[in-house]
Amino acid sequence: MSTTTKSAAAKADADAKKIAESPLTAEQVSAMNPLQIIAITDAVLDLTEKVLSLVNDAKKGGIITTEQQLAVQTKYASLKTRADGQFAGEHWRIAPPASVQQTPPAEFLQPGQPG
Amino acid sequence: MTMKKVIPLLFAVLSAALFLSGCAGSNRQLDPAGVYAGDKILYTADATITGAYETLDTFVAWEHKHRAGLSKWPEVRSAADYVRTNAKTWIDNAITVRELYKNFPTPENRKSLEGALVILRAALDQASAYYQSRAPQTST
């Protein structure tokens, strides 16, 4: 394994450990609502899993098979042409802040009021 | 405090994921019979670009899914909106340079491609730095 890959893998391992060992006092935990706890746990678990799988890939030796190459190329082609709706999902839209007053629908406007 | 420490850590993990997605095959050889015909630079570029998209997509989807629970930390949403605003440009720039290298594999274009990939990897650090600049200095 190359030095950079090794150091990245070590960094990822350290990050994952840091997350696992991140000290939360009972006070801090009780100050959080269940939604916040779920959000944080969910994200940390998802990302740690992703990083660990990448670390495993990075540690593997041998040859990158024709199938693996094809999978990467297919993903790239899809991203290039936005074939799978990349950047188009609801989560990619910037919603206005909750405090911004929206223009009311036309049926709620008074006669003569600008829409 | 909690989120102030956890979010940069998430960015660090995202950054590591992005870096690893690009170098996962750095010590491995390409099967010359594959679609890349042994062109490691092109393979690495595609793996990095798609890995970058997946990483950024994971982050904004996470923020969107848990927006209500995260409303106490508006800087998280700011950072996600920063990614939403810029990610397309980051990815498209890398794709443009990658296509240029694919069509004209000169040493100059190869250097440009390597530079574009470095920029792409730096983008997540930039998002993290943006988060840091928006995060309140006092513990929450």
Image (cartoon, coloured by chain):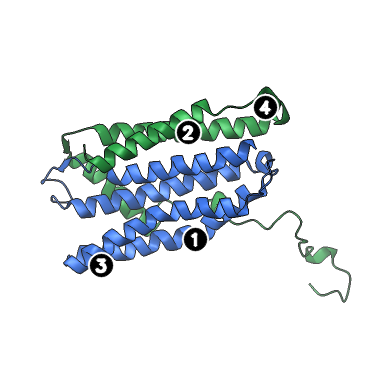
Residue B123 rendering spot, x and y as whole percentages: 44, 56
Label 3 CA crowd tier, 10 Å (few <14, some 14–19, many 20+): some
Q: Which chain does blue denote in the image? A: B
Whole-Å distance between the Cαs marked 3 and 1?
Answer: 22 Å
Q: How far apart are marks 4 and 2 (CA)?
A: 20 Å
- Checking the image for residue B86, the label placed there is 1
* Pointer 4 and pointer 3 on the same chain: no
Residue corresponding to mark 2: A46
Q: In which quarter of the image is residue B70?
A: top right
The tag on residue A29 is 4
* Image coordinates for residue A19, horizontal then vertical, percent: 50, 31
To the question of a shared chain for discs 3 and 2, the answer is no
Give whichever of B119, B49 is nearer the camera: B119
Q: Does label 4 or label 2 sit earlier along the sequence?
A: 4
Q: Quick check: marks 3 and 2 in contact, CB under 8 Å?
A: no
Residue at the image position 31 percent from the left and 39 percent from the top = A7
* Chain under disc 2: A
Marks 4 and 3: which is nearer the front? Answer: 4
Q: How far apart are marks 2 and 1 (CA)?
A: 23 Å
Secondary structure beneath label 4 = helix
- Display colour for chain A: green
Which amino acid does the dot numbered 2 rest on? Asp
Q: Is residue B12 left or right of residue B41?
A: right
The Cα atoms of the two marked residues, 1 and 4, are separated by: 34 Å
Secondary structure of residue under mark 2: helix
